Amino acid sequence: MAETVVPTRTIRAGQTIAAGDVTVMAGTVEGSFENPEDVLGQEARVTLYAKRPIGFDQIGPPAVVDRNQIVPLAYHAGGLQILTEGRALARGGVGDAVRVMNLSSRSTVTGIIGDDGTVYVGNTP
C-alpha cells in the first residue's frame, strides 16, 4: 500500500522540516510526497498544516538569500566576467531564479542563486 507524507504539526513558511515534523499516512495523493526522506531538510514555502499532504510545490531548498539582502552579482560570457553587488528582490534557495537590482546601474535582472549565495546572470561559470 502506498503512503503520503504529512506534517505532525503546523509548520510555518520559512521553517526547515526535521524528522519529528513529518509522518506518513495510508493512501496516495497525486502531487504529494510519498517518502519522508524527500522532505527532510527542506524549507516550507507556505504554511503546512498537520495531517494534510505536503505538495511538491510547497517546499524547497532552504533559502540562502533573503529579500533586500546585498548579494554578489556575477555575469560570465566567454572571457568576459563582470562582478558587482545587487539587492535581492525576493528570497530563494540554491538553484532558484531571483530578481536582483544592480546597485551600480539600478537596473533589475534575473539570475540563478549559486551555492555560495552569488546570483549568476547569463551563463554560469
Image: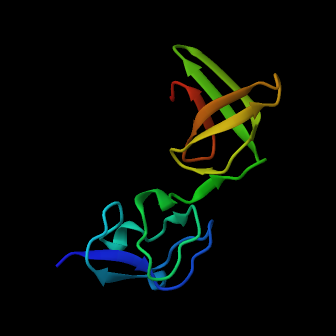
Q: Is residue 2 rendered to the left or right of residue 113?
A: left
Q: Residue at x 69, y 46 (%)?
A: 90
Q: Residue at x 55, y 42 (%)?
A: 114
Residue sticking out furthest to the top = 79
Q: Residue at x 78, y 47 (%)?
A: 68
Q: Position of residue 121 (x, y in %)?
A: 60, 28
Q: Position of residue 102 (x, y in %)?
A: 76, 29
In this rendering, is residue 13 above or below 23? above
Q: Position of residue 53 (x, y in %)?
A: 41, 73
In this rendering, is residue 81 above or below 6? above
Residue sticking out furthest to the left = 1
Depth check: 8 or 18 in front? 8
Q: Quadrant of residue 27?
A: bottom left
Depth check: 65 or 23 in front? 23
Q: How is the image coloured?
A: rainbow
Q: Quadrant of the N terminus?
A: bottom left
